Amino acid sequence: MDATVRLRATGTIAPARTFVFRQPAVLVAGRAADCGLRAPDDDRRVSRRHCVFHLDPPTARVSDLGSRNGTYVNGVRLPSHDPRPYELADGDEVRLGGVVVEVFSPVARRTTPTGGDVAPEQYTVLRELGSGAQGTVHLAWHEPSGELRALKVLHPEAAQRPELVHGFLREIRTTRTLSHPHLVAFHEAGSTGTRLYTAHEYCDGGSLDRYVAERGGRLPPEEGVALILQVLRGLTYLHEREADGDGAVRTVPDRLVHRDLTPRNVLLTGARKRPRVKIADFGLAKAFERAGLSGHTVTGALGGSFAFMPRAQIVNYKYAGPPVDVWAAAACLYFALTGATPRDFPAGAEPADVVLRHPVVPVRRRSDAVPRRLAGLVDGVLTDGDGNNQRGMSAKELAQLLQEAT
């Protein structure tokens, strides 16, 4: 088969243009006069040098060049300035502003992993979103619904460890009952024979920590507060819910505490200027009103991320209640406002020891751009809520105070 890549540009490029490559080449797309794929001057959504195609027939890759409005592949925005170009396949569609570039490379067809591979047959894996010790999260196309989903697959070796399988199944039981605009939606779970998987709503805006980094390391106070208010609405639902997913009222409320709220687990979706927040990752979530009765958490066990964890969560992890989530939400706001964590973690220091012994650094010592009233509120929550008292401020109360302080 002839090793050829064809790119067909349409949209605001009219008439359509077709580029044929049989040898390695680079094609820059943008409005600048020296771009090989030049967009019209009046398509202001396209940057002067927007993205670059790397052609090495039969393969084709694309990477964003730091464009203002982003480069999208099959509706998914590529990371800006990512040093690793995204590999394209036959039939992929790249969009920059009003320009649409279709990829034709019969040799480079995207395959659908099936059976005991990465994903069940109804999913087409597009790319990896992240990986950890227990599993990998993929961006996948769900063919029956036509939706993009986040597919979390447990590693085969992790499936041999009963405690990890137990935690994975507990996360499934927890998330499938949740339904709220500020929680990542659960779609389905199952196994491919050798791997357990769950499918969740895909959030195209990435995580809060990445968003803060892209905005220069700090957010304006109004914007940071607006995002955390959404987090607090999601937490209020978790902490106060009294109904099943179908609306049936429980005899005993099954209220949950997340216990691992961090900027990495706060995801964004929707319009870039006013994103919607979704809380993700309920692997450590637990019904706090039944703490100690389920056997889920052994006395002395510890989970969560130390940088966004109050002392109470270490001292009394098994019985950690809603106040640990409220503290973590305030810590996420601290991070959004200052670009730093509430505590300093010196190199070589034991993280748990830092949480137990080191004080929180006042907000305005990190950034004097934060208004005094708002800084005082955040400092107060992170200091007062850092003891062993489980009767701390509720998510709803903190939301009210934040609205009054901004």
Image: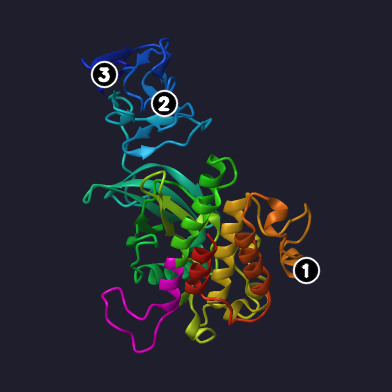
N-term-proximal mark, 3 vs 2: 3
Q: Residue 77 is drawn in which quadrant?
A: top left
For marks 1 and 3, the one nearer the N-term is 3
* Horizontal arrangement in the rendering, residue 324 relative to residue 73 (left or right): right
User: Which amino acid type corresponds to the residue marked 2 in the rendered image?
Assistant: Arg
Image location of residue 30, percent across then percent down: 39, 19
Task: Look at label 3 and name its amino acid.
Answer: Ile
Q: Is 401 in front, or is 309?
A: 401
The location of residue 251, given as percent across then percent down, is: 34, 89
CA distance for labels 2 and 1: 49 Å
Name the amino acid type tagged 1. Arg
Q: Which residue is mark 3?
A: 13
Please tell me which of labels 2 and 1 falls first in the chain: 2
Mark 1 sits on what residue?
A: 357
What is the magenta range?
233-255
Q: Position of residue 270 (x, y in %)?
A: 36, 48
119 drawn magenta: no
Q: Is residue 228 above or below residue 103?
A: below
What residue is at 42 percent from the left and 78 percent from the top? 240
Q: Residues within 10 Å of mark 2 (few under 14, many from 20)?
A: some
Q: Quadrant of residue 33?
A: top left
Q: Say what secondary structure mark 1 lies in.
A: helix
Residue at (66%, 56%) from the top-left corner? 341
Which residue is at the front of the view, 277 or 27? Answer: 277
